[in-house]
């Protein structure tokens, strides 16, 4: 389209307050994902275990023959374990292209030429992924807790397991933070979202495979800290007050999680940069 | 007067594309990923060898000293068959055509006077050559590092290494063909590929019945000479419901899978109109 008028016109709109630029990125990203029918199908599928558990809770509360299905703290732990599969696929679907696609389209420079800091850009992208991950972990787990109370018609379960609400919240937020930061860091390393997706699958499955070999050779679970998912499982059991799954001390697993988040932060700090103009 | 030009054959054109793509595949940034993936087992094998040398008791499984051949078998199962071969298939198979579409370079290939399916076939052959040439040395290094630990004999185990080579090459070819079809037909091939390789295949192998015949892993397992490891409850379940087809049946099934999926992928490339995003 030809440009007829090259004159300058002052911006007439309102200025967003400083530090809120990330909300624009997050809103746009979330809206664009909700517009994809295939992704909505994936989200619906991710809620399937929730419906199965809801039926289980209904049966346990209303049918004396199904008393053995009564929920416990471990039920919620298992539910979040099952959701790990969907966490993986949602992470690859949503997260692989978050920064990689911007790098491919050279959009990073355009973003950073706006009144938007690098931290806001990363936080906006993180918010997109975290929103969908919480939608398949924290939200169904909390709704399941409410469903249990409504089917039982009393607060006895909640009173006896008062730690469940903070446990679900803390565990899901740790899981989401680790997964989202790792995926964003990998996404910033390449221009191809397919490459990023495979890299993420590599981090998850290869670390587990290496641990699998070490376990098969030594018959000891003390090397579980090598496995990305095993660290989360170990910390999950600590948070849910369940017996530990692996011989690795839980502070070691926690250290590996913190290390993963910190390393991702360093990668993002180095990779998410605009063009430096040297005079 | 010059002689009339004849159209190049499918195989001749595929050979030209193979020549072009092989260099690109070997000397690309994604080779770093391949290096990490294949270097991991080698590093693990070195670590195991060092530990075995330092501690005379070696590794013990259920109180008995683990032989090097048994450890090598576990590594073949857990690292190569369950992870490396499928992941390489997903990675390279889905990107044979999709990468050219993403880079908007597919037009240059499709405007050449060669059949479109030759582009896919050439790239597929380049994938098979590239991955086989890189996976086999990694397996060989692991073999020599690990088998001699625990008093194992390299000479006695060597025939099984050759069988492993053949099995891995066949697996790479089969997975590559399946994911080439996924890459040519589906818009988001990676997700579908990952669901197939790490969702459908391990899940279906756990159930009794015929569903497992719709996997590549079922036929590949029949070609493995090593004992399946019991590293987790899932592995135990797999062993319980494991039914192994004969080697001849597996080879035939893998050949059919490779042939049919490649043919379907070729047809898809011939007929599909690729719209390049602006």
Image (cartoon, rainbow, N blue to C red):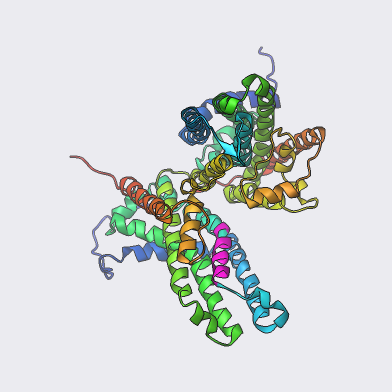
In the image, residue A163 lies in the stretch drawn in magenta: no
Considering every residue shown, the one lying at the far top of the view is B1
Name which quarter of the figure residue B218 lies in: top right
Q: Is residue A80 magenta?
A: yes
Q: Nearer the viewer, residue B117 or A274?
A: A274
Above or below, comparing residue A23 to residue B149 in the picture: below
Along the line of sight, the residue nearer the viewer: B130 or A55 = A55
Farthest-out residue, bottom: A153
Residue B194 rendering spot, x and y as whole percentages = 60, 48
Question: Which of the image's four quarters has the C terminus of chain A?
Answer: top left
Closest to the observer, B82 or A251: A251
* Residue B176 visible somewhere in the drawing: yes
Q: Nearer the viewer, residue B38 or B6?
A: B38
Q: In the current view of this chain or complex, which residue is farthest to the left?
A: A279
Residue at point 45%, 65% (across, down): A239
Residue beneath the point at 52% across and 85% down = A155
Residue depicted at x 75% and y 39%? B219
Residue B234 at x, y = what percent?
Answer: 65, 51
- Magenta stretch prevailing secondary structure: helix
- Numbered circles on residues, count: 0
- Regarding residue A105, the answer to whether it shows in the image is no
* Magenta residue span: A73-85
> With respect to residue B104, does A41 lie above or below?
below
**Residue A199 location, x and y as percent?**
49, 44
- B4 up-or-down from B126: above or below: above
Residue B92 % position (x, y): 58, 37
Q: Is residue B224 above or below residue A187?
A: above
């Amino acid at each position: 389209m030809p440009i007829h008028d090259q004159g300058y016109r002052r911006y007439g709109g309102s200025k967003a307050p400083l530090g809120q630029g990330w909300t624009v990125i997050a809103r746009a990203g979330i809206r664009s994902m909700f517009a994809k029918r295939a992704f909505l199908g994936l989200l619906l599928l991710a809620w399937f275990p929730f419906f199965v558990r809801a039926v289980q809770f209904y049966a346990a509360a209303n049918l004396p023959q199904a008393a053995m299905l009564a929920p416990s703290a471990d039920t919620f732990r298992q539910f979040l374990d099952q959701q790990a599969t969907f966490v993986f696929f949602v992470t690859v679907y949503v997260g692989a292209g978050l920064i990689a696609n911007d790098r491919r389209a050279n959009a990073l420079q355009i973003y950073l030429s706006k009144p938007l800091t690098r931290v806001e850009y990363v936080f906006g992208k993180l918010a997109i992924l975290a929103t969908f991950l919480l939608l398949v972990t924290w939200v169904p787990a909390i709704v399941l807790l409410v469903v249990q109370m409504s089917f039982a018609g009393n607060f006895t379960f909640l009173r006896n397991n008062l730690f469940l609400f903070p446990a679900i919240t803390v565990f899901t937020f740790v899981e989401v933070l680790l997964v989202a930061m790792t995926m964003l860091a990998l996404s910033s390393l390449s221009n191809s979202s397919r490459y990023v997706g495979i890299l993420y699958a590599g981090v998850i499955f290869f670390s587990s495979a290496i641990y699998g070999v070490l376990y098969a050779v030594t018959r000891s679970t003390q090397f579980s800290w090598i496995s990305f998912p095993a660290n989360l499982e170990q910390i999950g059991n600590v948070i849910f007050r369940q017996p530990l799954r692996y011989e690795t001390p839980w502070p070691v697993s926690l250290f590996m999680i913190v290390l993963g988040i910190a390393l991702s932060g360093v990668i993002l700090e180095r990779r998410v940069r605009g063009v430096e103009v040297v005079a | 007067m010059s002689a009339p030009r004849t159209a190049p054959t499918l195989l001749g054109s595929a050979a030209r594309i193979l020549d072009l793509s092989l260099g690109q595949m070997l000397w690309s940034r994604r080779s770093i990923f391949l290096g990490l993936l294949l270097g991991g087992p080698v590093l693990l094998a070195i670590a195991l060898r060092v530990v075995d040398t330092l501690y005379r008791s070696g590794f013990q499984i259920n109180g008995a000293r683990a032989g090097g051949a048994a450890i090598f078998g576990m590594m073949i199962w857990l690292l190569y068959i369950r992870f490396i071969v499928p992941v390489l298939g997903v990675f390279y198979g889905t990107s044979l055509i999709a990468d050219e579409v993403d880079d908007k370079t597919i037009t240059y290939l499709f405007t050449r006077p060669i059949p479109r399916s030759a582009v896919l076939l050439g790239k597929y052959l380049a994938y098979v050559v590239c991955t086989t040439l890189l996976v086999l040395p990694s397996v060989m290094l692991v073999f020599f590092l690990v088998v001699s630990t625990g008093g194992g004999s390299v000479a006695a185990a060597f025939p099984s290494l050759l069988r492993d080579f053949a099995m891995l090459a066949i697996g790479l070819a089969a997975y590559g063909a399946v994911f080439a079809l996924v890459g040519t037909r589906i818009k988001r091939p990676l997700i579908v590929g990952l669901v197939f390789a790490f969702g459908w295949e391990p899940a279906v192998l756990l159930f009794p019945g015929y569903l497992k015949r719709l996997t590549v892993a079922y036929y590949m397992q029949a070609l493995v000479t090593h004992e399946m490891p019991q590293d987790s409850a899932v592995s135990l379940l797999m062993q319980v419901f494991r039914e192994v087809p004969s080697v001849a049946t597996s080879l035939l099934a893998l050949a059919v899978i490779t042939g049919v999926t490649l043919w379907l992928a070729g047809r898809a490339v011939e007929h599909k109109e690729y719209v390049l995003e602006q």
